[in-house]
């Protein structure tokens, strides 16, 4: 029986490699022994052993997020499996491919009090693309082994991509020797291959969109999932539309149509009304900004009776056709890669005539760029004043970390889903060159703060040996501190920037901050903590810098980037959470003042 299990697991791994799998994250345990040994034995698979199941799952998520191919996470049976659930939910909502492999006891041990035995069947509910369970492997189901493995990969990389759960039952003994494997297809091909439609949008659809968009006041709202940023920029230039570029879109480049500070601009009521669009095209995932969300909702809503305003048309475009429309106002949900649509539509417009009437009305794009340029100058000047006095501010840390990551050749910048992702969205300037800034990643599917560091480590595994930077708040850092276990022993280059405001800063921006008393707010929402983050990092052997003066922030970020250690960290002690709210208000006020001068 042990030899059959060994052959079964070796077949799974062989078939996964044929399907493109290259990374596996194993949380040690006994019942998972056959698959763990098979993964380690295959020279093509990079295996990382992770002591915490939750960390392992988020690391596998990070690898899939970075590469678009599924990574394996493997656990033993019992409660170990339950620790994967948060990462499975995030992979489901963010549409990240993931192979969730859980070892299990055989059926005869269910319901009789056997150790480490829980009902793992369909444990992850609706959050998976497929549930696969062959039972205990034996010679009778040998013909299904390759099919099971190939099916798992095909389901994980489907449209939409996501997690697949393989529940794998093994009987003791668990250590065996794999004999000959079932014969695979020739030339290293996978047993099953799923071909998803790659057809470009039809001429009929392109014609419909061209007729609907040409000559109108439109905007592209670009989020994560834009696979060809320059195609989007080229279409926007043809139409005379601004691209409101969230950092994860990779569209925040120095181009005449790109707007970096739309959040700050749209906070100013006069400008949010002046810049009311007729068409909003949401490319990829929804940005984090509530200001965007409110502005879009107001633009697309049917006005009260008698109001002389026509609601804007909302078009949602993403490769899977996912229904990212929380206000339920989309006129069209289009399953198409955003860059592919942009390229096809621009070619259609160019081919259909000289295009004099394609561009938006005069002044539409110019107004956006004038406002964005004024906002950019105001923010730069305000943040420069911050650098000369007091403690570092969180917006300055976000800008500084992104710039340092760029200077030191980072391929990825991973940010927490709370304030760091918002500070980048609000304050990160345009980049002069496409690709000059590292690709920005954040777990925005479920928007949780768990697993941030683990996700970053998984991204670093997939992108090794290139450096990966991480911008994380102290609370998210502490939630995922087990990701630091053995981190310095991995052959990775990771730079951690921990923003320490001694609690959960985002709650101070919510209505609860003023709706309840100060003591009650601090008790329920302040999430106060006094742990020494630098000491915790050093306990794990991580080269750690500290800074609590604004004037030294850039110097310490530079020292972090130049550290000779594979893993290094900078703990930035910023002002208290109330001061952070004041700082954000001050920056937005500076933008409002600049726009009022522009309006005059």
Image (cartoon, rainbow, N blue to C red):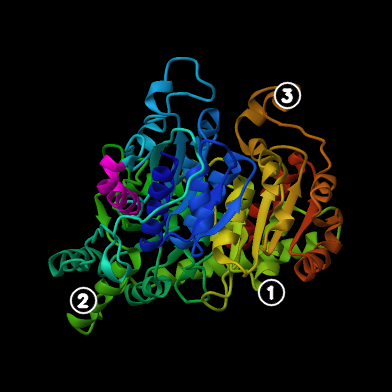
User: Which comes before the other along the chain, label 2 or label 1?
Assistant: 2
Ranked by sequence position, the earlier of labels 1 and 3 is 1
Tag of residue 415: none
Q: Nearer the viewer, residue 51 or 259?
A: 51
Please, what secondary structure does the residue beneath circle 1 have?
helix
Where the N terminus falls, by quadrant? top left
* Left or right of residue 433, residue 583 in this image: right
Image position of 507 (left or right of 583): left
Q: Nearer the viewer, residue 200 or 512?
A: 200
Distance Cα–Cα, label 1 vs label 3: 41 Å
Q: What is the spatial separation of the Cα atoms under label 2 and label 1, in whole angstroms?
A: 39 Å
Q: What percent of the width, then of the height, locates residue 554?
A: 79, 66
Q: Which residues are magenta?
A: 139-153
Instruction: Give the residue at mark 2.
Output: 348
The reply to whether dot 3 and dot 2 touch (C-beta < 8 Å) is no
Query: Of helix, strand and loop, which mostly describes the magenta segment?
Result: helix
Q: Report crowding for label 2: few under 14, some 14 to 19, many 20 or more residues within 10 A (C-alpha).
A: some
Question: Which dot marks residue 523?
Answer: 3
């Amino acid at each position: 029986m042990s030899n059959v299990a060994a052959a079964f697991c070796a077949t799974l791994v062989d078939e996964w490699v044929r399907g493109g799998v290259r990374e596996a994250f194993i949380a040690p345990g006994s019942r998972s022994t056959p698959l763990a040994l098979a993964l380690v034995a295959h020279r093509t698979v990079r295996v990382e052993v992770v002591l915490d199941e939750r960390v392992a799952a988020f690391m596998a998520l990070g690898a899939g997020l970075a590469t678009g191919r599924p990574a394996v996470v493997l656990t033993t049976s019992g409660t170990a499996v339950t620790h994967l659930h948060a990462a499975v939910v995030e992979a489901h909502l963010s549409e990240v491919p993931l192979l969730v492999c859980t070892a299990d006891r055989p059926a005869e041990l269910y319901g009789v009090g056997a150790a480490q035995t829980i009902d793992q069947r369909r444990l992850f509910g609706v959050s998976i693309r497929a549930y696969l369970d062959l039972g205990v492997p034996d010679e009778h189901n040998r013909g299904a082994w390759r099919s099971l493995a190939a099916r798992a990969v095909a389901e994980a990389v489907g449209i939409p991509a996501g997690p697949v759960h393989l529940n794998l039952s093994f009987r003791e003994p668990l250590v065996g020797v794999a004999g000959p494997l079932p014969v695979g297809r020739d030339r290293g091909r996978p047993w099953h291959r799923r071909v998803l439609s790659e057809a470009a949008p039809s001429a009929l659809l392109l014609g419909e969109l061209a007729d609907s968009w040409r000559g109108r006041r439109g905007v592209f709202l670009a989020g994560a999932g834009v696979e060809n940023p320059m195609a989007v920029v080229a279409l926007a230039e043809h139409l005379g539309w601004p691209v409101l570029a969230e950092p994860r879109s990779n569209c925040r480049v120095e181009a005449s149509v790109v707007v970096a500070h739309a959040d700050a601009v749209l906070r100013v009521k006069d400008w949010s009304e002046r810049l009311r669009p007729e068409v909003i095209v949401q490319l990829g995932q929804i940005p984090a900004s509530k200001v965007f969300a409110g502005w879009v909702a107001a633009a697309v809503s049917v006005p009260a009776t008698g109001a002389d305003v026509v609601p804007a048309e909302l078009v949602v475009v993403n490769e899977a056709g996912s229904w990212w429309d929380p206000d339920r106002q989309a006129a069209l949900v289009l399953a198409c890669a955003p860059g592919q649509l942009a390229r096809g539509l621009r070619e259609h417009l160019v081919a259909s005539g000289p295009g004099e009437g394609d561009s938006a009305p005069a002044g539409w794009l110019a107004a956006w760029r004038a406002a964005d340029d004024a906002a950019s100058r105001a923010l730069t000047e305000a943040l420069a004043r911050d650098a000369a006095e007091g403690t570092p501010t969180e917006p300055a840390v976000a800008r500084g970390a992104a710039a340092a990551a760029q200077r030191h050749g980072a391929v990825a910048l991973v940010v927490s889903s709370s304030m760091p992702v918002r500070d980048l969205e609000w304050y990160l300037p345009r980049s002069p060159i496409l690709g000059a800034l590292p690709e920005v990643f954040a777990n925005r599917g479920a928007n949780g703060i768990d697993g941030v560091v683990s996700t970053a480590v998984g991204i670093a595994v997939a992108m090794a040996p290139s450096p990966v930077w991480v911008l994380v708040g102290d609370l998210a850092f502490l939630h995922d501190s087990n990701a630091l276990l053995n981190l310095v022993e991995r052959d990775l280059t990771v730079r951690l920037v921990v923003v320490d405001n001694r609690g959960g800063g985002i709650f101070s921006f919510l209505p609860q901050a003023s709706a309840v008393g100060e003591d009650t707010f601090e008790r329920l929402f302040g999430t106060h903590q006094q742990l020494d983050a630098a000491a915790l990092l050093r306990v794990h052997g991580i080269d750690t810098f500290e800074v609590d003066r604004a004037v030294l922030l850039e110097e310490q970020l530079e020292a972090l980037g130049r550290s000779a250690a594979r893993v290094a960290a900078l703990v930035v002690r910023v002002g208290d959470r109330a001061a952070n709210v004041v700082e954000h208000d001050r920056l937005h006020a500076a933008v409002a003042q600049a726009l009022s001068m522009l309006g005059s």
